[in-house]
Amino acid sequence: MNWNEDWLKTNRPPASEHPKKYTLIPSGSGRIAFIYFVTLIALDYLALTLFGGLPIVIAGMPLLIWITVVFAILTIAGILWFSSRNSDNPGESEYTSRPHEEQP
Amino acid sequence: MNLLPPEISEIVLANYGLIIATLVAYFVVFLVITWMAKRQLVKETGDYIVASRNLGWIVVTFTMYATVLSGVGMAGIPGTIYVVGAPFVVTALSGIIMAVALLWYFGPRIWVLGKEYNLATPGDLLGGYYQSDTIRIYTVIASVLYNVAYIVAQLLAGGILLNVLSGNVISFNLGVLIITVVVMLHVVSAGLRGIAWLDSFNGVLIVFLLVLFGFAIMAAGGGVSGVIAGLGGIRDRFISIPGMIGIFTPSRIYGVAIGLSIGSLVLSPSAWIRMYSARGKDQFKKVGVLLLGLWVLSHVIGTFLIGVYGRIVFPEVGNPDFISSLLAVRVLPMFFAALFLIAVLAAIISTADTYMHTLTATVVRDFIKPIMWSNMDDSQEFRLNRLIIIGVAIVGVLLALTNPVLITPLAIFAGGITVQLLPALVGAVTWSRASTPAALISTGVGMVLTLVWELGLVSNPLHPSVLPGLATAFFINVFLFVVISYMTRPPSPEQIDKYHGLLARKI
């Protein structure tokens, strides 16, 4: 049996010395994308809460389905938009640190 | 044991020649794909497990689509829509939408790390980053629970289908055995490339038939409006929240979506392996968009209308999982109905082959190799993968024959287990402040709580309409992960640079 917990053997400096470069909420275009998708989810949830209980049919389909289809379309649009922005700005990395912080 | 309803058996017997010819034609295509992939297989683990990281984006998309759709999408989801109403299609689609956004974000990161450090499994990445074999074992536990649950459900459904499609010539037990042996030989011969190619064929067949099915229902029911109006007195409850059984509130929709779709499409070990196997990090934008398009088509035009029209035509069916098959022989021309039943079989095969391959790869690479056989070389790992799959198949057959269960609840539970790996993954690729003790404790707690709540060993403190057990467990997992990370020391700067630094430079 060869069980390794190497993290116990490595030198882990205290949190005060931790490089705060790689954060949960990114900077630059990554931050806008993060906000966009979180807002989209919140709006979808809100729409389901406010309108999901209404038995309305639009063009044959229930409103509930339309809410989800719009959510899907806006997600696809977001992926395409932020991907194209990212490829237009090769120097700027998404969801990571600011450019000057990226070099070790 | 619930075998297919007698109506389908009678129609199958009346059209026996056509159905057998279609079945034989499908298996001929199956064999040709296996043979072509076998010719390209290089006998090393990198090719067997991740197809030498050289799958194109269309193949990656269809292999993810066909694998995740499985018998669940072809039978279980229409059956659950039949019972719950429109809120369940919203549940399935909402989860997929969030999963696709996560796939677009995590896919390139997992791919870059995989390429740089020759990673092939979730345990390679998480165990490597947190430098902990315990975390590696968590991924194995998630893989075993997830894959076994799905394999058992697929073998069960495959056995039933073969029994009926053969006009009872093949018994249920023999059907399970045949599916198992066919899938096992396919995986062993062709590796991931063969699985992905077969999935691509199956995926195209499935999406075509689901859309065709939807249009046939519209033709039979007088358009979408006519179909919805046909629900009569139950229309209002069927098409709105909280649905027919009264518990699908927005919070429950999101809670179930986490397990059903995010777990399967992003965090299941098989999805992870597909992210490693793509040709490049820039493919995930296209994969995400095509995948979401396919799912919207399949669910809005296919599974939703099947569930609705099934409710109208067969208001009191014994087992809702059979509603799509029942309806196929009622509304589709016989050739396409036969093809639909075979497409269900194709979806079952696409899932079973993937999960047998994944289960074997994770057990060998993340348990046997690091813990029991540390000096295992590549050729030994490759041979062991092909050997262990026999054990996996035997366990799958035994469980399928002794524990027949409904498909969809099993899928939600299995996805709920894998989704507990999400906080640890965020720590490894995004949030460097995350610590190893946090990943150890929060992931373990999340998995245990999912097990006890979803299996009903202990009752979930929240009512199911508020939040299902797996989602409650997930939020507790996230909370613990953040709190413990701030209370303990992060990984070493060298380790952080090796992962986060690399991603910052490459993405």
Image (cartoon, rainbow, N blue to C red):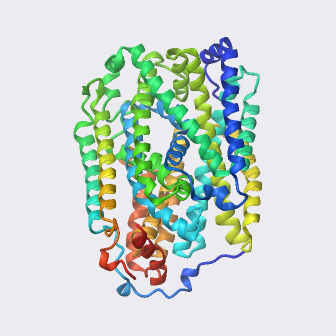
Is B301 in front, or is A46?
Answer: B301
Counting from the top left corner in percent of width and height, residue B10 is at: 64, 13
Q: Considering only vertical position in the picture, is B329 above or below B33? A: above
The residue at the point 39 percent across, 15 percent down is B221
Q: Considering only vertical position in the picture, is B149 above or below B132? A: above
The residue at the point 51 percent across, 36 percent down is B73
The residue at the point 36 percent across, 77 percent down is A102
B398 with respect to A62 (left or right): right
Residue lying at the far left in this picture: please name it.
Answer: A50
Q: Quadrant of residue B427?
A: bottom left
One can see residue A19 in this view? yes
Q: Quadrant of residue B66?
A: top right
Is B311 in front, or is B298?
Answer: B298
Image mark count: 0
Counting from the top left corner in percent of width and height, residue B110 is at: 49, 63
- Report the quarter where the C terminus of chain B lies: bottom left
- Report the quarter where the N terminus of chain B lies: top right
Q: Considering only vertical position in the picture, is B372 above or below A10? A: above
Is B42 in front, or is B438?
Answer: B42
B394 with respect to A37 (left or right): right
Counting from the top left corner in percent of width and height, residue A11 is at: 50, 88
B249 with respect to B202 (left or right): left
Counting from the top left corner in percent of width and height, residue A38 is at: 29, 55
Q: Considering only vertical position in the picture, is B101 above or below B295? A: below
The residue at the point 63 percent across, 77 percent down is A4
One can see residue B399 in this view? no
